[in-house]
Amino acid sequence: MTEQSSVGRFGRGPGLFGPRPRSSLREEGARGALIAFASTVIFIGVAVWLVLTSETWPAVQRQFFNWSNFKEAWPVVATGFWLDIKMFLVAEVLILVIALAVAMIRALRGPAFFPLRVLAITFIDLIRGVPIILLILLLGFGVPALQLPGVPRRELFWGLTALVISYSAYTAEVYRAGIESVRESQRMSARSLGLTQVQTLRYVLVPQAIRNVIPALLNGFVSLQKDVALVFVLGVREGVRSAQIYTASTFNYTSYVVAAVLFLLVSVPVARFTDWYTDRDRRRMQAVGG
């Protein structure tokens, strides 16, 4: 056996133990994509057939997928959904700022900062232990009932406050995980240069931590976009509440489908962007690690 044939069989060539030819990989990829497409079409086709052949489908179609009601409910629900968008944008800015402050407080070291750390940990543990819908009800109905002078009484304000408080506790833990993922040598180097703990966090640890947790923050971004609708329990006329009012007046549930479509139009692109960014960040980390 010659050296050339040996390399072709055992080395870098397309031999028995070498890399497979690109044409073979392309054919395998095309075959896998075709199988995936065919199986998806078959699954969807069977599901649609089962639904359309159901005896109760005509009644369900009239109640949930009535085109005339869809067109009639769209502007009504869309007007309320615009309030969801505004709440979502305002809450996200406040959450990112408040959560970062809480995480930085918890990351402080030394006995002098112990009371602050206890407060931060207590806030996180208590808020994360209360369901968000319950927190909205407690603040939305409880605080205005106190009738405290100078304290806002609008349900929208307290519903938004409950969302910010709840998500700040969860997001603070995301930030903290990012801070702790930075190597300890970074903190020690900054301290050896004369930086205080706060300066070390601000200029050294936090910038690196934020880059590490952006994918997790984007996932929270997607969840918040849907959870803003929970303020409807306070009577706030946002998208879901508008759909509920329309249903109460027409006894038709198509308006809920309209609300679902509006939320999907926002959440699906954001979710796809999150997946794309997460995949890009993973490839970047693998390249750096390699």
Image (cartoon, rainbow, N blue to C red):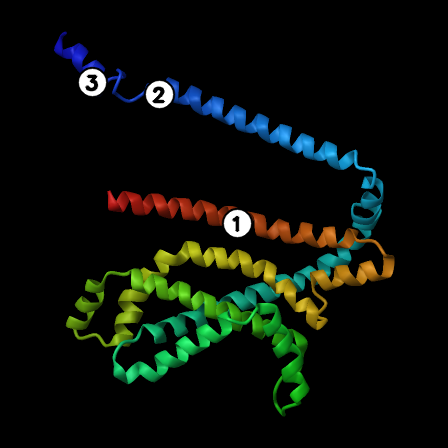
Disc 1 element? helix
Q: Which residue is drawn at 34% across and 43% down?
A: 283
Q: Which label number is shown at residue 15?
A: none
Q: Is mark 3 on a helix, strand or loop?
A: helix
Q: Label 3 vs label 2: CA separation?
A: 18 Å
Q: The residue under label 2 is which amino acid type? A: Arg
Q: Which of marks 2 and 1 is nearer the N terminus?
A: 2
Could you tell me if residue 66 is visible in this image?
no
Q: Position of residue 155 (x, y in %)?
A: 67, 76
Quarter of the view holding residue 2: top left
Asked where in the image residue 255 lies, by quadrant, the reply is: bottom right
Q: Which amino acid does label 1 sit on?
A: Ala
Q: Where is 274 relative to 164, above or below?
A: above
Tag shown at residue 271: 1
Q: Residue furthest top?
A: 1
The circle on residue 22 is: 2
Amino acid on which the number 3 mark rests in the picture: Phe
| Secondary-structure class at tag 2 | helix
Which residue occupies 58% across, 52% down?
267
As drawn, the label of residue 10 is 3
What percent of the width, then of the height, locates residue 111?
26, 83
